[in-house]
Amino acid sequence: MMTNPFEKFERKRFLYHSEDLGVISMNHALFSQMEEEDFQRVEEQMREDLKDYYNRLKF
């Protein structure tokens, strides 16, 4: 999971991650169906996951 955190979503064709370009792109059909509330939930989840990740690294 650490080497390619987007692999699961790439297999389902939701996201595409280009390590060489440093780009993450989202499926346009999925993107067009998302509403502001969906984006807020995604952002909130990302912040929580990031916080949890760094908390686990503390010794």
Image (tube, grey):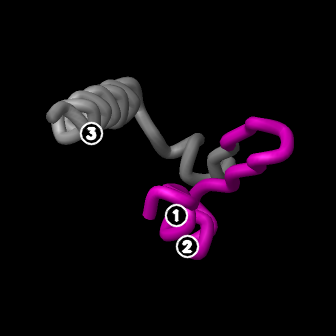
How far apart in space, not on screen, are marks 2 and 1 (Cα)? Answer: 5 Å
Q: Are marks 2 and 1 in contact (CB under 8 Å)?
A: yes
Q: Nearer the viewer, mark 3 or mark 1?
A: 3
Q: Amino acid at mark 2?
A: Lys
Q: Which mark is residue 53?
A: 3
Q: Quadrant of the C terminus?
A: top left
For the residue carrying disc 1, how many other residues have a C-alpha within 10 Å: few (<14), some (14-19), or many (20+)?
few
Q: Which residues are magenta?
A: 1-24
Q: Which mark is residue 9?
A: 1
Name the quadrant containing residue 38. top left
Tell me the residue at 69%/51% (across/down). 17
User: What residue is shown with label 2?
Assistant: 12
Q: Amino acid at mark 3?
A: Tyr
Helix, strand or loop at label 1? It is helix
Q: Amino acid at mark 1?
A: Phe
**Closer to the camera, 31 or 8?**
8
**Closer to the camera, 13 or 28?**
13
In the rendering, at what x and y percent does residue 57 appear?
24, 37
